[in-house]
Image (spheres, rainbow, N blue to C red):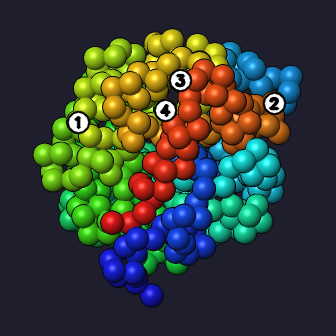
């Protein structure tokens, strides 16, 4: 059965159905629970590397040991156990953003939500061009929009499991023409469904602003648009505050990545303490309502099973650090509960 806009309005939509947004509680806004982020070239490589162990996980994380298999997780039992650890640490809801190209598994997410006792909110749409099927290159903006509307109102990826947010919609720097069409379709789908939109920006520090300007020019409410991965993209206050001033939501979603090494760009990755300093700057400039956080776990080696921090890290370790650094309970609640609740409520 296709849901109407009226049926969605004022609700949040998990993989198990519509819920009162007040039930969501502490929320991770950008994660992957069952995923495959290998590029097509990685998938074609016969050498998928070793199984991840406590003896090699550091080398794999640091990029000195090749392991494409690290970028894929299909084991529901492992994911369920990791989610139970998050619940024990104080988490309640996870936004799962394995969009088209990252092998989304809606029925698997249903099983995880039931078995782990968590709310799982699924994304929809398409990742960056490299991951998209050849057929997408001839599709129109309207066709992409209709697909995303159906994923929210009827079911996604050939199932009856409905998405509760649009994204993560993939962009690169420079932004490709296909990715612009997908983004324009996502903006149309926002308007038709009342869902929020999550954006995966390219790695150039000006690309988040380019996306924000594009979205505003296409008539979307910037307050319903979340720009992901800011902690690997923007490293100066001028760009960060200008982006926040444009009205979009700023997502620091690489909490738990504590080493400066980052294999995908020549940057110094900030640690969790530096992330909190950037968030404090945003709060001091009046942008508390424009901040959300997460881990963006998409490597097996970041799971506790393999020696990583896991989905519970923010609740177990970052929240106590926030308190030690002077964050008030109201600020912590806004970042982990109130802001996600607002964004995940259909308007």
| Mark 1 Cα-neighbour bin, 10 Å: few <14, some 14–19, many ≥20 | some
User: In the image shown, does 23 or 199 lie closer to the viewer?
Assistant: 23
Relative height, residue 217 to residue 204 (above, below): below
Q: Nearer the viewer, residue 149 or 164?
A: 164
Cβ–Cβ below 8 Å for labels 1 and 3?
no
Mark 1 falls on what kind of element?
loop
Q: Residue at x 75, y 20 (%)?
A: 58
Q: CA distance from mark 4 to mark 1?
A: 17 Å
Local secondary structure at mark 4:
strand
Residue assigned mark 2: 307
Q: Residues within 10 Å of mark 3 (few under 14, many from 20)?
A: some
Q: Which quadrant is home to the N terminus?
A: bottom left
> Where does label 4 land, which residue?
252
Residue 182, numbered circle: none
* C-alpha separation, residue under disc 4 versus residue under disc 3: 9 Å
Q: Which residue is mark 3?
A: 276
Query: How far is the residue under mark 2 from the one under mark 3?
Result: 24 Å
Q: Quadrant of residue 274?
A: top right
Which one is closest to the eye, mark 4 or mark 2?
Answer: 4
Q: Quadrant of residue 207?
A: top left
Q: Are marks 2 and 3 in contact (CB under 8 Å)?
A: no
Quarter of the image where the C terminus is located: bottom left
The reply to whether the C-beta atoms of the residues labelled 4 and 2 are less than 8 Å apart is: no
Judge from the rendering whether residue 42 lies leftward or rightward of residue 144; answer left or right.
right
**Reading the chain from its start, which is encountered first: label 4 or label 1?**
1
Q: Is residue 137 above or below residue 265?
A: below
Q: Residues within 10 Å of mark 4 (few under 14, many from 20)?
A: many
Residue under the point 79% across and 37% down: 304
- Residue beneath disc 1: 246
First in sequence, mark 4 or 3: give its number: 4
């Amino acid at each position: 059965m296709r849901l109407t806009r009226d049926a969605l309005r004022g609700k949040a939509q998990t993989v198990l159905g519509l819920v009162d947004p007040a039930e969501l509680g502490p929320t991770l806004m950008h994660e992957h629970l069952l995923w495959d982020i290998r590029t097509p070239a990685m998938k074609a490589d016969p050498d998928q590397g070793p199984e991840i162990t406590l003896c090699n996980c550091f080398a794999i994380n640091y990029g000195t040991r090749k392991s494409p298999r690290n970028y894929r997780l299909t084991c529901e039992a492992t994911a369920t156990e990791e989610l139970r650890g998050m619940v024990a640490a104080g988490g309640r809801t996870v936004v799962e953003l394995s969009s088209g190209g990252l092998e989304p598994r809606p029925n698997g997410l249903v099983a995880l939500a039931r078995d782990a006792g968590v709310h799982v909110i699924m994304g929809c749409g398409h990742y960056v061009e490299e991951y998209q099927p050849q057929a997408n290159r001839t599709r129109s903006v309207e066709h992409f929009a209709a697909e995303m509307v159906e994923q929210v109102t009827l079911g996604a990826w050939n199932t009856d499991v409905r998405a509760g947010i649009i994204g993560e919609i993939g962009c690169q720097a420079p932004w490709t023409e296909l990715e612009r069409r997908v983004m324009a379709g996502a903006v149309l789908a926002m308007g038709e469904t009342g869902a929020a939109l999550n954006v995966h920006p390219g790695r150039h520090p000006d690309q988040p602003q380019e996306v924000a300007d594009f979205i505003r020019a296409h008539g979307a409410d910037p307050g319903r648009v979340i720009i992901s991965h800011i902690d690997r993209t923007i490293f100066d206050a001028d760009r960060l505050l200008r982006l926040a001033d444009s009205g979009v939501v700023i997502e620091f979603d690489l909490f738990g990545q504590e080493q400066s090494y980052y294999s995908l760009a020549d940057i110094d990755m900030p640690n969790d303490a530096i992330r909190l300093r950037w968030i404090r700057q945003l709060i001091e400039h009046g942008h508390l309502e424009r901040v959300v956080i997460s881990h963006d776990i998409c490597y097996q080696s970041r799971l506790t099973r393999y020696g990583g921090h896991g989905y519970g890290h923010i609740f177990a370790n970052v929240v106590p650090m926030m308190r030690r650094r002077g964050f008030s309970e109201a600020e912590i609640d806004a970042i982990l509960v109130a802001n996600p609740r607002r964004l995940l409520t259909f308007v």
